[in-house]
Amino acid sequence: MTKTIAIDGKTIPFEDGQTIMDAALAADVYIPHLCHHPEFTPHGSCKLCSVKVNGRICSACTFPAAEGQDIINNSDELNGDRKRITQMLFVEGNHFCPSCEKSGNCPLQAVAYYLNMLDNHFPFFFQTRQLDASHPDVLIDHNRCIFCTLCVRASQQQDGKDVFGIAGRGINKHLIVNAESGQLKDTDLDAADKAAHVCPTGAILIKRTGYQVPIGQRIYDHHQIDAVSLAASGSRPSAALPPFVAVVAEGGRHGR
Amino acid sequence: MQDFIASVVAGHGYQPTRLMMILRAIQEQYLHIPDAAIAQVARLLAISLTQVIGVVEFYHFFHRTPRGRYDVLISDSITDRMLGKQELMAYFSEKLGVAVGGVRVDGRVSLDNTSCTGLCDQGPAGLVNGLPLTRLDQARVDAICEAINAGKAVNEWPSEWFAVADNLLKPGLLLNAPISGGAAIQAAYHRGLPETLAEVDQSGLRGRGGAGFKTAMKWRFCSEEPETERYVVCNADEGEPGTFKDRVLLNSYAHQVFEGMTVAAAIIGAKRGLVYLRGEYLFLHQKLLDMLAQRRQSHLLGNNILGLGQDFDIEICLGAGAYICGEESALIESLEGRMGIPRNRPPYPVSSGYLGKPTVVNNVETFLAAAAIAVKGGDWFAGHGTDKSKGSKILSICGDCQRPGIYEYPFGTTIQTILDDCGADDVLGVQIGGPSGTFISNQELNRKLAFEDLATGGSFIVFNNQRDIFKIVQNFSHFFAHESCGFCTPCRVGTALLKKQVDKIFDGHGSAGDVVALEEICQLVKSYSHCGLGQTAANPVLSTLQRYPELYQEKLKKISYEPGFDLDGALETARRMAHRNDAAAHLAQIGEDHD
């Protein structure tokens, strides 16, 4: 007999070894997330995927699905708190959506829209952060990094490299690269690497591709992040979405 | 430098798990970890550069730029502040000619704050080149400055400057009757190991770090894992401000702690044990190493212990200034040579801990108690305490009392009894379990020390009626923001927001709505954080807000809104650049004229 969990009253099958997030994505249920990507080891740091499992708050991306779990996901309370957590990410860094190359194609921005985030709510930190434009093809804008480690994991787990890392502690956390000079140009990162394309914000960008997709044709101009995310994870037919979203589903090479 | 580093790394067997100890040696030699050293260590250990940089930047006692030849750190714990730390720090800074956080121009001396050094019963305290300075006062500071300016080596300074007293004032069930070396091991094998586990179960012993998980259950889970390579880890990283009991236990009862680890190892089938000693307790390191050597000589460690067939040995790893490493999975990460970031659970350490192997992590005091239980049996221990909290608890008492020190009580003892014993009157409240615990007011002194009422890892800080609650809360909120590992959003950003919001209100810039905003941040940090640090970081605010809501309201201005920044202050740069300082260049903060 198939094992099942219940998410917002809907019965969902799962297999041993699957997390709540895995089971949800496979069953066409969207749980907001930023640091999670189905191709990489879950990290559990952004906390947007917090759900209530039998009354207890857990990260869906890391918590194993188990028989008898009654899970609340899409509630006003959780979405309200997820909005606050997203606002924390916005005030911590320096995010200027209107001028950002990633605008319209940005999961951070899209999840904020999904959660109906209309202001920053918290005071800004105005941290001084650097730009690394040393690499010929790839740019790091540290102002936009949310420490999800997707680039770290993609580099290690898919590219077979080890280009990125996170250093520092607390609010001083920062993205570093694997080069004695500390500069991206001295790493073995290639613009075709998964790590250069997996960033859910505008922190890692491919040079000379900014603003190429006209407003109105960008990924999130017509689709909310839930639809895009479910298509990317393969639970919805990507044919139902515009071609550029289908590209996301096949490997995350958007904007090219 | 290359040769030095090569020999250090070789001395640690090229083991990446020894990264912390390797970096400690480099820091000591070069007063920082030079970039070239980082690269060389990464190469020699065959680990990534990013891992080494991550570790160097994560721990407070490692630096990427040189500290002074005399590196002075002063404990910024609330109890040190209550003993005049801030004035003393200002005096120190002026006298040495170095800014707090800075290095003197000649490179000789550096001065900075550090989190609680575990010397709260003999503060104001600090560290010089890692060694403890106790009972600091102006005269001592004068003498220290003189020694530094004369270039006198730290090992030539008078030993009384480094004297650390046990202040063991009220020994109880455990501390009154330490067991003799080998007694617990003999008893455990004589009785039978499964039977000894049953005794530990019968004793009702629960983890003494504060969380209170049943020790026997932890050991049983670990022993039932299919993987047979298993580890015993002793958590001696007591970083909770106000706690110093493990300092005393390791100074005067270490044999019994090691014995408890050995019994645990026999029961779970571990061949190796590790003690994670907080970096602040460097002064205990050599003493503990000597005791381990002595135990090996006495066949209490090593192969075929006491001829009973057990093989087990213990090594000591030093931390480097990170409160978060008291969390067991962060501690394991640190033992493996990584940043102290708590792991996702499940899996729990009992099934996947050190090096991914089944691991029992227990507090120093838990092993101490377990050794005694192995000798005297479960009923002996369970005969003390309450129904749900068996046995005794060792407290580190400090703050506003006449006799700060170590006290041991059976669980169920009232707070009032404890206050009477340590000589505390005119009490405003008591912080039980440190900043991550609970603040109780003087209306609650009949509450009891117990897991079911007031649980504590050992910290017990007394405040008298002259103390300002806000200064306490502010100090604690800054502490958590400072110590957050930064892994998850709610804690990384939330503790920083909490600090800002607390400062805004306490510095008199709060207006209507700001207490509600404070509460909201508290709830987010508490509910959504990844580990215990974040989940408890809001406790100082929440427990005082619950008890003194009127004090918070009084702090608020009677205006509807005030921005979180000082407008006039923010204009200062522009005024300087424009060479203007007339009245029109000073704008009044919004709403200042309103009521």
Image: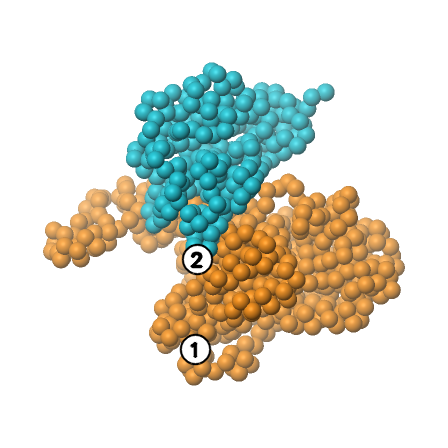
Q: Which chain is cyan?
A: A
- Say left or right for B581 vs B189: left
Q: Amino acid at mark 1?
A: Val
Q: Amino acid at mark 2?
A: Asn
A252 relative to B289, above or below: above
Residue corresponding to mark 1: B141
As rendered, which of A181 and A74 lies closer to the eye? A181
User: Which quadrant of the structure image shows residue B110?
Assistant: bottom left
Q: Secondary structure at mark 2?
A: helix
Q: Residues within 10 Å of mark 2 (few under 14, many from 20)?
A: some
Residue A152 is situated, as x and y percent measured from the top left of the image, at 51, 43
B88 relative to B517, above or below: below
Residue B308 is situated, as x and y percent measured from the top left of the image, at 86, 61
A98 relative to B273, above or below: above
Q: Secondary structure at mark 1?
A: helix
As measured in the structure, the alpha-carbon distance from the residue carrying label 2 to the one carrying label 1 is 24 Å
Residue B475 shows which numbered tag? 2
Q: Nearer the viewer, mark 2 or mark 1?
A: 1
